[in-house]
Image (cartoon, helix red, strand yellow):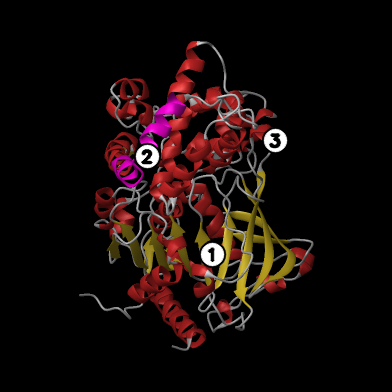
Amino acid sequence: IDRQGDCKRSMLRLSSAAATTTTTTTPRLAQRLGLASPTQSRGGLPHAPRLLDHLPHISSGGSRLLHSHRGALNRSCAATMSGRGDTIETSLGPVTATRGATDVVNGLHLRELFFEVPLDYTRRAGDAAEDSKDGDFQGEKTIQVFAREVTSSRRPTDALPYLLYLQGGPGFESPRPAEAGGWLDKACESFRVLLLDQRGTGRSTPITSASLQAMASPQAQADYLAMHRADNIVRDAEVIRQCLGQPQWSIIGQSFGGFCSVSYLSMFNASLKESFITGGLPPTDAGSTATKVYEALHERVRKQNAKYYERFPQDKGRVAAVVAHLLKCEEEGKEVRTPAGNTLTVRSLQSLGIRFGSAQGFETIHFMFENAFEAATGNISYKFLKDFDAMVSIDTNVLYALLHESIYVNGSGQSSGWAADRVAAPRGNFDAAWALAQEEPIYFTGEMIFPFMFDDIAQLRPLKEAANLLASKNDWPELYDDDALRENRAKVAAAVYFEDMYVDLHLSMETAGKIRGIRTFVTNEYLHSGIRENGPRIFEKLMNMTRNVETIR
């Protein structure tokens, strides 16, 4: 396929449809999109403002970038952005776009892009007076969002369309490519890939324990954090699309990035040509689905524990020895501190089971327990304590711990309410003291955030009150729109992993049934990280499905 020519032909068809078909944005949707009032739109696709209204006019330096449907729309503005910043009017408000440095790594060209975007897209000029005394964001009304454009050294770039990558998490930055390889190298054969640091991560006004502690109060922290869910991540992506002059683009979402993709399909369906989802179809029911999610996943965690001890039966005694030592320390009132200042308790030790759902997760935990004790003293070894710190990523990415349960709340009226803590209350093999007494294998927990983590993890301790406020918050905005998904017009393909410990198979297929035209690739070859284990195959499979290279059967 001549991709450049195909892209131009698609845009001509789209422009023709835009000239003949009218749809209306409803008041409810207008509010969700951050529009001031209901708007009539031309584009032939429901739930979308007029497509050409999304295109930017660059006003910096008195110049204006005009767009037409006659082929110019598929040219990137990234190369023409200035290093000083251009102000671009988007459908969601003005955005300042700046080009940063360019780099070369083995096989790849990298270009830095920065965008100054609204912290809260629903707020307009003059809304500052509405800030609550406790929830003031320290006067911060805009944030920086960073993206890295990646292209292959082997191919010309300007003719290729964009592919936006949405990272898993929440609260983790995009990958930092050191060389061409994996799914990224495969994607660069057909796309310019945009690696987005989602707001609050990486170089996108990062959220850290220190930055939150600088705020006025726990309520201010909670209000600020609430601006960092998938709905605003998608709005950031949407204004970036407009800044880059793309009438439509393709997206790929891994894990939580897939959740963001489904939000994108719900909110700005007309902006998407293709959506590739890997291990990331979320439950989209209204209200809080957190309890349902954890009930389903807790059973999968149980099965993974059984498989772990079947694989490494010698670890039953090794794990028991560490648990017995920690229980004794707790009884004697002694804290076991790690080099990072974390407190190693039985509960925090069990949380290492989050690794059981990824490639080499079993092996990682197994080798960690090989040298758990110092032979000379009988205490937990320094290496073990340091390895534990290395496993705890929520101290450097606190956003994950603070917002994890909120990703399962779709709309107001319900809170997440520490759902994992209710569902996974210690019992049976998960009750370490009981299992130790019964000489049963001690089970690890899975991808769950518990209140005790805000006692045991040093960087989370100052954020405990904010975490409780977020857990009790019951006025979250909607993340998904089932009606919009049923009217989907984008090409969508999703890899669904049969034994996924993080994103439940049955809940994923339930959501797939709501998305018009989706094609699913269900496999037990991988757990959750197929994109890392065999990225080229997974990516090519999904791309072939959306483009009907692999026909429906």
Q: Please tell me whether residue 250 is drawn above or below residue 506 in the rendered image.
A: below
Instruction: Identify the residue at the far top of this view.
Output: 332
Query: Mark 3 Cα within 10 Å, few/some/many (few <14, many 20+)?
Result: few
Q: Please tell me whether residue 512 is drawn above or below residue 107 in the rendered image.
A: above
- Residue closest to the eye, 340 or 149: 340
**Where, by quadrant of the figure, is residue 515 drawn?**
bottom left
Residue 370 x %, y %: 49, 40
The magenta-colored residue range is 305-323
Label 1, on which residue?
54
What residue sits 50% from the left and 74% below the top?
186
Residue 137 visible, this orientation: no
Q: Seen in the image, is 112 located left or right of residue 445?
A: right
- Residue closest to the eye, 548 or 370: 370
How far is disc 2 from disc 3 in space, using C-alphas?
A: 56 Å
Quarter placement of the N terminus: bottom left
What residue sits 61% from the left and 68% below the top?
244
- Residue closest to the eye, 185 or 319: 319
How far is disc 1 from disc 2 in space, using C-alphas?
A: 60 Å
What residue sits 65% from the left and 44% below the top?
206
Total number of numbered discs in the rendering: 3
**Where, by quadrant of the figure, is residue 220 drawn?**
top right
Query: Mark 2 Cα within 10 Å, few/some/many (few <14, many 20+)?
Result: few
Label 3, on which residue?
139
Instruction: Identify the residue at the far front of this view.
Output: 376
Residue 84 x %, y %: 79, 61
Label 2, on which residue?
314
Check residue 479 for magenta coloring.
Answer: no
